[in-house]
Image (spheres, rainbow, N blue to C red):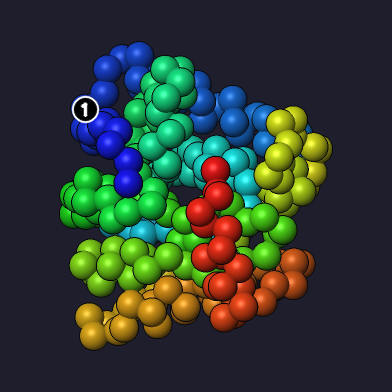
Amino acid sequence: MTTETKPETSPGRYTPLQIACFHATGLVLKTFFTLWGGYEVIGLRENIPATGPILLCANHASNVDPPLGWAAFYGYRRLRGVAKIELWKPRAAAYILDAHESIPVARGAADRSMFRNVFEGLKRGDAIGVFPEGTRTWDGKLNPAQPGIGVLVLKSGVPVAPIAVLGTFNMLPRGTKFPKRTKLKIVFGKPISFSPDTPREEIASRIMVEIAALMTAHGVPTEPPDAERARLAAERSATDD
C-alpha cells in the first residue's frame, strides 16, 4: 500500500501557462502521431458526444496509449485520464499531466481519492478515460478488467464507451525506450449503458468483450480474457511496473 501523497486536481481552474501547455501538447502529439504513426481516428465524433459525462474504457498496450488519446481528442473536447501516481514524480511530466487534468491513482489498493475525483468529474460532465486492465499487456493480448471498473460504472451511472487502441504495442512495447514507426489506429465504439442492478463482474466482462470485438473488427483478431488469462495476470501483478 502506498503512502505517497496524491496531487489533487482542480478541474476548470487553469493558469495561462497550463492553458498554453495543454494546447502545445495537443498540437505536438497530433503532429507526431500523424508523421510517425500515420494514426487514424475512427468513430470519435460519431459515437462520443461533444458534451456531457462519459466513461471511456480502452485496452492498455503501451505507454503511447495516453498521449494517443490526447491527440485524438484535441480539438474536439477535453479528455481527462486516470494514470498511475508514479508518473507525477518528474516535475515536467507532472506539469503536463496537471495541464490535462489527469487523475492520479495509487495502484495495489482501493484508492478513494481517485474514485472521488472521477465521480466529481463525471458529475461536472467530463469525459474521463480509464484502462480497465489496470496495467499494460505483456504480450499484446487483453488482460481481465480490474473489479474497480464495475464500481465506477455503477456509482456514476454514466454511459461507457469501449475503445480499441491498435498498433501501440508494436510501436512501444514493454522494455523498449524508442518508438518504432508503426501504423496506429484508435477506434471508438458506441456507448453502453448498464442498469443499476448489473453485477460488477458482468460489467467488467462486457467491457472487455466489446473492446475485443472492436479490435477484431479493425484488423487485430483478439479474444476476450479468459480464466487462464486472469490467473496469469494475478501472478504477474506483484512484479508489475
- In the image, what residue occupies the spot 58% across and 58% down? 236
Tell me the residue that label 1 is attached to: 13
Residue at far top of view: 17
- The x and y percentages for residue 103 are 33, 41
- The x and y percentages for residue 221 are 74, 72
239 is higher (above) or lower (below) than 216: above
* 97 lies left or right of 115: right
Can you see residue 224? no
Number of callouts in the render?
A: 1
- In the image, what residue occupies the spot 33% across and 77% down? 200
- The x and y percentages for residue 234 are 52, 65
Location of residue 229 by image quarter? bottom right
* 76 lies left or right of 155: right
Q: Nearest the camera: 141 or 50?
A: 141
Provide the secondary structure element on which disc 1 rests. loop
* 188 lies left or right of 77: right
Q: Residues within 10 Å of mark 1 (few under 14, many from 20)?
A: few
- In the image, what residue occupies the spot 30% across and 84% down? 198
- In the image, what residue occupies the spot 23% across and 85% down? 197
**In the rendered image, which quarter contains the C terminus?**
top right
Residue type for callout 1? Arg
49 is higher (above) or lower (below) than 124: below
